[in-house]
Amino acid sequence: MGIWKNIAWLGVLSIAILLGACGSEVDLEELDPQGQKVVFWYQHTLEREAAMQALIEEFNRTNPHSVEVRGEFAGDYNDIYNKMRLGIQEGSLPQLAVAYAYQAQVYYQADGVVDLTPYLKSPRWGLSAEARADYVQAFLEGDKVQGVQVAFRPQFSMELLYFNADWLRELGYEAPPRNWDEFAEMCRRATEQPFSRSADPERSLGLLLEVDASRLASMVFSRGGDFMNPWRRAYTFNTPQVKNALALVSELVDCGAIELFREPHADRKTFASGQALFALCSSARVSLFRSAVDSSGGVVWDIAPLPYEGGKPVINMYGASLAVCKTTPEQQLAAWLFIKWFTEPAQQNRWVQGSNYFPVRKSAAPELADYFRTAFHLLEYGKSEPGTARYESVRRMIENAMVKIVDGADMDRVLSQLEREANKTL
């Protein structure tokens, strides 16, 4: 009889717990965020951190709920990712954190961040229909996983081709390359005819290419390829587009027109000193390239879409989002209110000027500088890398495969293995 009493008691206890859980559901519309404190982990440094801190200070001073946000530099994206995973295990989290969509998905699966859908749709705290229409819809959808809004994008970047316009003219070209054949031709010519104002004519490159998954993704996208199948259920690396991209890189490395690098900032130093005709990297680095060029004596340079095959460009667009950590209902709401304020047009304009990111609000576009405004209009050609939960580990696999293939390993074998190992992460 004792065992049956225990089972009956467990049943009653389970029902009580369930009822208690149902009764503890919080009505978002009735929450009061007054006086809540929000710790915000970000990766920004230098000018961007100063711009972010200025915006945080303004929010703290002007928001009607006396919410206080404290921004903290928590390392780079990987540092924050590792701290978040540890914090989820230990039950010690900030209220707000920077995260890529695939990282936020990991946090959500571990019960570390909240679904922002109720906040977005809240009659009291959410976005109006007019405000929602002003957001670039692709970015609202980009952080949605199976109907769950795991994070919210406050800005974005795109992959661009930086080029030395003075050197191109010396080589006899009036415009950047339209396709990859033209790009390869220009790179080879650059090795034969160094820039007249090069800091070191003995080293003359077409491109110093970073070993980075986003660089390869951009080259693949521009050929009409992808890293996943159309249903986003499997990785696809052993494809003609990936092979063609890597074959071109390998060929240009072999003839000395491209060098690979991993050292931070090496590409802009080489570009600014007139030793590389092109650079391939994020739009977020425009101001860094400008400073590097200015400090090296100055050349005329510009940005353009990557070379592409077909009738229109395909631009790799990406950017970290903001994830609201699972803390208390009041703190979660306070964190959301900061996100909402931060992505309003006035704040977007200030953030763009201080960060060189692109805004997610369409109404902020007219305030952009000319080169940013031109690039902003490439939005319709945007495409994103996979948002799967373990894409970070897949990125490392991709980068290792790039190096192996350029070093002479069998491409089919390396890509087949990459595809198998990547699909094991799904």
Image (cartoon, rainbow, N blue to C red):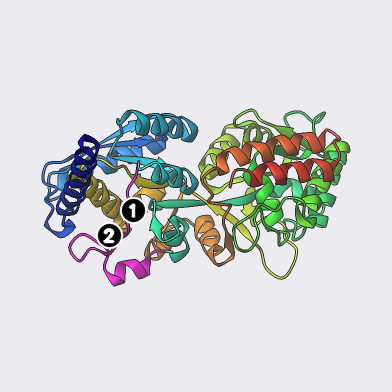
Whether residue 43 appears in magenta in the rendering, the answer is: no
**Amino acid at circle 2:** Pro
Which residue is rendered at x = 56% and y = 56% of the image?
Answer: 384
Q: Is residue 158 left or right of residue 344?
A: right
**Amino acid at circle 1:** Asp
Residue indicated by mark 1: 115
Task: Count neighbours of disc 1 (C-alpha within 10 A) and say few if under 14, some if 14 to 19, many if 20 or more.
Answer: some
Q: Position of residue 263 (x, y in %)?
A: 64, 28
In the image, which residues are magenta?
A: 112-135
Residue indicated by mark 2: 118
Q: Is residue 106 left or right of residue 263?
A: left
Whether residue 116 appears in magenta in the rendering, the answer is: yes
> Which secondary structure, mark 2?
helix
Q: Quadrant of residue 398?
A: top right
> Which quadrant of the figure contains the N terminus?
top left
Please say if the residues under marks 1 and 2 sit with CB atoms less than 8 Å apart. yes
Could you tell me if residue 307 is visible in this image? yes
For the residues marked 1 and 2, what is the alpha-carbon distance in whole angstroms? 7 Å
Which residue is rendered at x = 54% and y = 61% of the image?
Answer: 374
